[in-house]
Image (spheres, coloured by chain):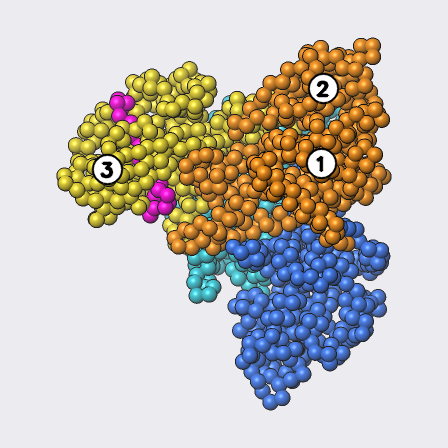
Chain colours: A blue, B yellow, C cyan, D orange
Amino acid sequence: MDFSLGEGQTMLRTTARDFLTSECPKKLVREMEQDEKGYPPALWQKMAEMGWLGLVVPEAYGGMGLGYLDLAVLLQEAGRFCLPAPFFSSVVLGGLTIMAAGSASQKQELLPKLAEGKAILTLSLSEPEGYYTAGVRTTATPATDGWSLSGTKLFVTDAHIADYIICPAQTPEGLGLFLVDRNAPGVTCSLLKTISGDKQCSVVLDKVQVSSAGALGEPGKGKNYLDKVMPAVLMAKCAEMLGGAEQVLEMSLTYARERVQFGRPIGSFQAVQHHCANMAIALEGLRYITYKVAWLLDEGLPCATEAAIAKAYASDAYQQIAWLGASVHASIGFTVDHDLPLYYRRAKAAEVAFGDAFYHQELVAQAAGF
Amino acid sequence: MDFSLGEGQTMLRTTARDFLTSECPKKLVREMEQDEKGYPPALWQKMAEMGWLGLVVPEAYGGMGLGYLDLAVLLQEAGRFCLPAPFFSSVVLGGLTIMAAGSASQKQELLPKLAEGKAILTLSLSEPEGYYTAGVRTTATPATDGWSLSGTKLFVTDAHIADYIICPAQTPEGLGLFLVDRNAPGVTCSLLKTISGDKQCSVVLDKVQVSSAGALGEPGKGKNYLDKVMPAVLMAKCAEMLGGAEQVLEMSLTYARERVQFGRPIGSFQAVQHHCANMAIALEGLRYITYKVAWLLDEGLPCATEAAIAKAYASDAYQQIAWLGASVHASIGFTVDHDLPLYYRRAKAAEVAFGDAFYHQELVAQAAGF
Amino acid sequence: MDFRFTAEQEHFRQEVRAFLEEQLKAGIFKPQVNAWTHGYGPELARRTATRGWIGLTWPKEYGGGGKGYLERVIFTEEFLRCGAPMDFMIGDRQVGPTLLAFGTEAQKRFFLPRIVRGEIRFCIGMSEPQAGSDLSAVKTRAAADGDSFIINGQKLWTSAAHVSDYVYLLARTNPDTAIPAARTLSDFIVDLKLPGITIVPVVDMTGGHMWNEVFFDSVRVPGSALVGQKDRGFYQHMAILDHERSGMERLMGNYPLLTAISRYVRDTHVAGAPLCQKEWVRHLLADLLVKYEVGKSLIYRVAWLIDQKDDSAAGRIELTRSTCIAKAFGTRYEQALDKAAARILGPGTLLAEGAEWAPLAGMASLAYLYSPAHTTQAGTHEILLNVIATRGLGLPAR
Amino acid sequence: MDFRFTAEQEHFRQEVRAFLEEQLKAGIFKPQVNAWTHGYGPELARRTATRGWIGLTWPKEYGGGGKGYLERVIFTEEFLRCGAPMDFMIGDRQVGPTLLAFGTEAQKRFFLPRIVRGEIRFCIGMSEPQAGSDLSAVKTRAAADGDSFIINGQKLWTSAAHVSDYVYLLARTNPDTAIPAARTLSDFIVDLKLPGITIVPVVDMTGGHMWNEVFFDSVRVPGSALVGQKDRGFYQHMAILDHERSGMERLMGNYPLLTAISRYVRDTHVAGAPLCQKEWVRHLLADLLVKYEVGKSLIYRVAWLIDQKDDSAAGRIELTRSTCIAKAFGTRYEQALDKAAARILGPGTLLAEGAEWAPLAGMASLAYLYSPAHTTQAGTHEILLNVIATRGLGLPAR
């Protein structure tokens, strides 16, 4: 066993933290929440230049060919800084799905663009009827030289700025994945007004024409592809949550040391000490259960259950940490100009993203033969 | 509205507390846990003389004809002192069921004896298949001049010392209630080895002959009778729990004031203070939700849902209080000679008696139209 | 014991309910979650006043209703039930009782009838940047200058200052640092239109504006602005704090959410069955209903207790213990409700008011955002537990 | 990062497992819940010793195995998994490491090989009636008398004293009350057969006997009984406490209950369907499985951390923080398991071992009774949280 990060990972963390400290102040995060696009293209381009967008893209496709632990380290920092950019959408949801489902030519076409920041991708996993494959009512009907897609997608992150939206849809052969050009006729993309801090969209597809080349992998195998990519998506979300949770604990500790009431720092009161200790306990578990999934992915070992375990735990743990952080800060942490609400709101968004604790407990129960 | 007890109730409480302080020390409670019978007949006789056994029995049947609030007050003290006597079984389970289901002659026959302490009654509500009317597999087959009962009853409190066990059984007309003489041929009563502090029995009925006069009320109306008596049973259990919970808080406060560590009473540490405050919060709710049901019963108003609400709340609240009390006491509260375990064990027995919180939440959900 | 309202009280409830339905129909107010903290409705206040319902518990000689606190609870319950604004509440709940206990006859004659008529609104100027849980750290200075006082300093978290006429202010009247801080503070009623007062909004994470910073720059007030005894303000404040903690607000502040989520689980079908048939949903909501009933009994009892007017030391401790318990219970209930709604709605919780697809018109997202703030008003939850343990249960403070 | 045991470690696990199966078959021990606290099995200890598994982490020159803490965790995990007694644990886990850190060469040469051979058993004499969480309040006195010490006083909660050969004792060696108490205490190893020692059982609420009172009436011990520096016992104890908190015990102490309740919900049918198909049962148990995996990762990491041997100040803080977090997590997990079992079994939880109808052979009733005690061993849960906050997170103690 080895619970330490490799040298490359430690360096990546340092680089990322330095970069984001200077390039991603909270002022920018707040501006981007109000911004229509939600990200600064200049920052995005710098991230591309640093190789981050192609971090896990194989070198053959213009990426750095690094592993999931590296991705976890980077996403941890993204979570810590509330990075306002379509990193998760494009690199994790888009990139990993292309890598899992795309043909050689689709990979050749899309991955280099993705790595260079010239194309932004995202993936839709919810519809009004529900989440994941069981909820898909969108249909893909065979048409001349391709497919015609109709349906409604919900909570599609960053769809409004994506070049391509990967859409699961029902084909005569079963579920397929389709690359939908956001600017194609029949695509209506609307920003949803949310409290989540990132950009969530509804996407209505009305007889959208997708060419044969736009079907990702084999139609009918959509569930296989998604099942394959999902452990990495869950791990990536847990890593982002881990970074956010770390920052909440750190800012709570700072405040508890500095804020004086009744003639002493509030961090000397047992109630506040226990709040902080409970945050540390919840956080510590989150850290290693997340890294473990990343390591399993790097080893190419099956980890669907481990990923469900991690997300089940992370969903509740980050909520608990955000809550305790709010209790330590009291009123000041409830004001719009404070950093805490940035995390408090994201904690809820992350909790419900890709299934909450309840959803993943059910998967764990199934795996245990219950 | 009036949240104060009446003068008679205050007097009853004082009398009961004085009496039990002198007659029911914890030494006796411990002895009776080891005792085969589980109660001191002399104490039982004194309680009869004080009129407690006939407290809610109408004066016409030799009782005091008092109300449910009076019963609540008395049971609160019984809970506070861990009274080792079949009071709950005989007065609440037995007496109230006879009053609800018995014919005039059955009342005339049994209630005066019950009030005088000359007959001990109990009621069986569980079988291996489950609790309450849905779990009854015991059958009552019509026989010459009466009925023949066969089946197995579980968790029958004080059955080993009861003169009569009221047994629900399936008749051709539906559920009926039957007065089973414990000494009748075919009745096998065994003490169960439990952690509950009181005496729980299994009762096996093997073709037990019950005369026609032994059918309580009309056969087939058993569920009506039980539904009628159940709110009072639940209220009575909540009152007993309330008394126990009060005592746990009081002994925890005393210990927190007296026990010194790090040069100060542990009650001055915020963690211990918050444990005690949380006990007080849980307790305060339990008090008024219990009295409210007693008052509704006294007014003759329907209160099945209110009783379910009270027991749902009480089940969790007393558990929480017992737990927090254990946390305040730490190791000393885990020793066999300490009083705390008496309550800690009874809190679990009371929690699961007549349905736990989960069971009653379901009833509340039904009442709310969910 | 008696858990029933009198026929008169039931009648009064119907009256209030009918009144509110009428005002709602007439468009006098718009129902709103958290209306009692964020709402502003001077016209509704005036109309309420004409019914004699502001200052309901005050003596008739000052224009009050001479009624009990149980009536006041009924009144509040109905307002909260339909999300009506209660901008007269601070005057009604705190300033009035304080003046009745400590004010001069002139102050009573001036302020009480105006509150009762719904003409003036108050805010409370207690907290400061360095004085949150610890009020004895208040630094705002009121220096005697002849017959008047000169006020300098800053208040924070001052709810509704921007729509108020007066601030009920806690300020230092004795600069001697050798004296325990609690014995250096006094209460004032300060007209917010006076020169030298600046009000700056503090926007909360919902984007809402309830809180303010209030700056005092050499604000001169007459000696008659002093309420009660000089240097006794801290104790006067403590004596009246029970009134702030005693109401239905915690338990029913979120009542529209309870109604909405109950309806939602009955009406929403998942895989052909109503959501409320799922076992976990049933139990989650049943648990809330149970706690709601328990909480109501605690609050009704506090109102009854105030009406008993037991001014003995034991009686006052009992009141503090009971009000703090009721508030702590209500706060937890409200948070449990917020969490339950969020869990049932899942990603729908993220959708804000006005968003397409938003369930419950965005009510649950707002409740999630408000939830942590509920614990801090009128004392953080931790302080409340301290008070229950020390004053209520007699544990040693140190 | 690497979350895999090495092939050698996996092999070692199989070896331990096979060994235990063999001993079980041969009737050398009876599986028991809480065997690691209540179990007594000198024959199993001797057999374990012949495999070289006691003192697994100690240097070979003292008869140790020279292995890492990860191996020790594997070993413990297997013993806990099958409820085998571990009466050698105190010597192995605490006394050995303490002697290695602070003992004289003679002490090491005498005690370590005997522990390793499974010949002697230790108990820990720390707590006293007035010294529970606050060890600096220890009153037991060890007065120097020429070359020896005379010990007078009383210990409480001394686990397994009645089956031990030696007590590892904390006693006052300096009566000067002007000196901070922590600097007046020393460590001793005292032979329990010495005249003047009386051991009185303290029976717990399960009826079990693990705890004892140990009375010292003018017990004379040689100067060589002193361990480490005189008057530094408190600090030596603190330095070694991480070893007591670092193990699998909290998380796996109840492992047989987890297995049994999982089997129960699969095998028990209610209304024709297995209990585990009920939604609330699935989620209750899945939550436990999730937390069990999380807890395991925390404990494996602590073992790995000890093996890093980082003796810097930061390294030591990191170890304390990590061990306290692992123990706090494990304690809560164990309580959640006890509660879950009780909730699933309902009234069946009341049925004790040996009772007719008792589900899981009464295991759940025992778990319910033990549950509060789990929080207090090696520091109450509150003290653990204090340590995490102050030493681990750097919050001010006051």
Q: Mark 1–mark 2 contact, CB under 8 Å?
A: no
Instruction: Give the residue type that dot 3 points to.
Output: Val
- Give residue D80's position: percent from left, percent from top: 62, 40
- Give residue D70's position: percent from left, percent from top: 74, 44
Chain of the residue under the numbered disc 3 shown in the image: B
User: Which mark is in front, 1 or 2?
Assistant: 1
Labelled disc at residue D50? 1
For label 1, the crowd category at 10 Å Cα-Cα, with few meaning under 14, some 14 to 19 and many 20 or more, is: few
Residues under labels 1 and 3: Cα distance? 62 Å
Residue at (52, 27) in percent of width and height: D207
Residue at (76, 17) in percent of width and height: D172
Against D216, residue D228 (above or below) is below
Against D363, residue C368 (above or below) is below
* Residue B291 can be seen in this image: no
Frontmost residue, D183 versus C264: D183
- Give residue B233's position: percent from left, percent from top: 35, 36
Chain of the residue under the numbered disc 2 shown in the image: D
* Residue D187 can be seen in this image: yes
Frontmost residue, C29 versus D140: D140
The question of residue B134 being in magenta is answered with yes
Instruction: Give the residue type that dot 2 points to.
Output: Asp
Q: Which residues are magenta?
A: B115-135
Residues under labels 1 and 2: Cα distance? 25 Å
Labelled disc at residue B208? 3
